[in-house]
Amino acid sequence: MTRTFRAVLLLLAGAFAGCSPPESESPAESGDRNLSTPYQAVATIGMIADVVRHVAGDRAQVTTLIGEGIDPHLHSPTRADVVAIDQADIVFYNGLMLEGKMAEILKRANHPDRPVYAIAECILEQGDFVMRDRSDRYDPHLWMNVAGWMKATSIIVETLSEFDPDNAGNYRNNGAAYLKELERLRDYVQLSFATIPPQQRVLITAHDAFGYLGKVHGIEVRGIQGLSTESAAGVRDIEALIEYMISRRIPAVFVETSISDQNVRALIEGAAAKGHALTIGGTLYSDAMGPRGTYEGTYIGMIDHNVTAITRALGGQAPENGMNGRLRPKTP
């Protein structure tokens, strides 16, 4: 069967992806897989791919579909994406409509020989951790609360252990080591945000990607756009936000690496016209991590960068180079 024909079948057939292997696959069939080394794992976003790399080690070659600086809400699947999914042995994605335009392809890709897992939807099934917005839509940005990504790590450990049971011990050991790193990151986030003066604990960004971070650490989060960057910000929304920032004497707003800074700059100009000086407190990683091969291109580096920038810009105390001393210095 040619790659092109198989890719067409991928779009037309398959089952819904979930937290369990496809129903047609028994545990015995799962254990009898003839996996090459490394096997091919595909993840839609870098945050998931980073966890898979830590847990799988050299057992898997991990491909990320949506790279640095790309907005997953608006990403249109390419032929290369479809081929990568088609040739994968296992696929991970976030779900809860984060990957909007790719969702249907991912759901249809699930197959006994290529299980597909929606990590955020797996977390949703575990309890009430997943947040909803004012329109009662699920918020997909779970990685913004380190506890959420600890849950994701545990899910990926168990998923890979079932997928490749001969190496389950390695996956669990790798996962335990990574969870210790995440615990240290969680503590750093808590301690850093606790130093921000209460009056200034307001985080204003381009869109609502930071709700989980704000909820657990007592920071009010306001995005100019909604949960998805497909939503538009109106003039009245921006004007109301300007008045709010002036009333709270907010010193800084933030731009995001994967989203245009046009609306944020409109806030700064509007506030300046009313005599309130706003600065850009930093560029945050929201729906995508930093460049591959950099510290900010890892999940821990991404969160370290965000937390350090937010804390320092809002009047708190955090080391300039972050938790591990590895953050790149700001360019003038």
Image (spheres, rainbow, N blue to C red):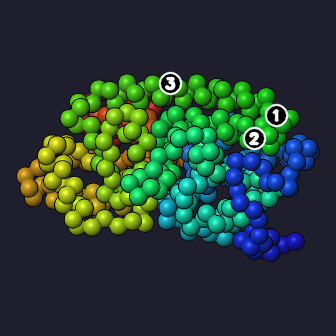
Q: Quadrant of the C terminus?
A: top left
Residue in the foreground of this view, choosing between 86 and 244: 244
Q: Amino acid at mark 1?
A: Asn
Horizontal side of residue 288 vs 158, given as left or right = left
Give above or below for 77 relative to 141: below
The Cα–Cα distance between marks 1 and 2, rounded to whole angstroms, is 9 Å
Residue 194 visible in the current orientation = yes
Which residue, given by chain and number where applicable, does mark 2 sit on? 160
Which residue, given by chain and number where applicable, does mark 3 sit on? 184
Q: Secondary structure at mark 1?
A: helix
The Cα–Cα distance between marks 2 and 3, rounded to whole angstroms, is 24 Å
Q: Secondary structure at mark 2?
A: helix
Residue 167 is tagged as: 1
Residue 327 visible in the current orientation = no
Horizontal side of residue 309 vs 237, given as left or right = right
Q: Are marks 1 and 2 in contact (CB under 8 Å)?
A: yes
Q: How many marks?
A: 3
Residue 183 in the image, given as x and y percentages of width and height: 53, 26
- The quadrant in which residue 263 appears is bottom left
**Does label 1 or label 2 sit earlier along the sequence?**
2
Q: Amino acid at mark 3?
A: Arg
Residue 165 in the image, given as x and y percentages of width and height: 84, 37
